[in-house]
Image: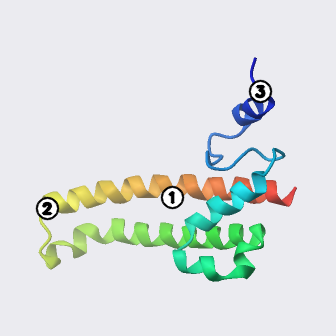
Amino acid sequence: MPTTAQMVRTSLSPDWPCQVKAPGTHDWERTAARWLRDLLPARYAGYSTLTRHPMLLARHAQLQVQHEIRAVRVALHTSRQELPALGVAESVIENSIRMYAVELEQLGRLARGIRLVSEALLR
């Protein structure tokens, strides 16, 4: 017989981060804050305003991921034009394009996860 936590977990969106407990379960907000904090550059851990307020963490993590998405899109769209002039081999350019495409997918999943966690924190 599945536990309540398992039933809640299975009803969550596939984009819900596996590192974050389901909303309403014991200590879920702490796991959400830890996950959000881990998405930010390490230097942000020293800002107690962020670390004490999960909604601020969520907002900043969303901004951070949006900027990363923009940076990866620029890198992806300019690879074929700019990398040959830098002496990068064609095979490396193709590998970097595939890498950027995978990274965009991962960042999209992170952005959706942050949105879901943010919405749950607001409830």
Instruction: Name the residue rendered at 12%, 65% in the picture.
Output: 89
User: Depth-wise, is mark 1 or mark 3 nearer the camera?
Assistant: 3
Spatial CA distance of label 1 from label 3 is 31 Å
Q: Extreme top residue here?
A: 1
Sequence-wise, which precedes: disc 3 or disc 2?
3
In the rendered image, residue 93, in percent from the top left (x then y), is placed at 21, 62
The quadrant where residue 43 appears: bottom right
Please name the residue that numbered disc 3 is placed on.
3
Q: Name the residue under label 1.
A: 107
17 vs 7, left or right, is: left
Image quadrant containing the C terminus: bottom right
Q: Confirm or deny contact between disc 1 and disc 2 (CB under 8 A).
A: no
Q: Mark 2 points at which residue?
A: 90
Q: Note whether 101 is above or below 22 in the view shown.
A: below
**Which mark lies nearer to you, 3 or 2?**
3
Q: How far apart are marks 1 and 2 (CA)?
A: 25 Å
Front residue of 2/69: it is: 2
For badge 1, the amino acid type reads: Leu
**Which marked residue is nearer to the observer: mark 1 or mark 2?**
1
39 to the left or right of 120: left
Residue at screen point 71% across, 77% down: 50
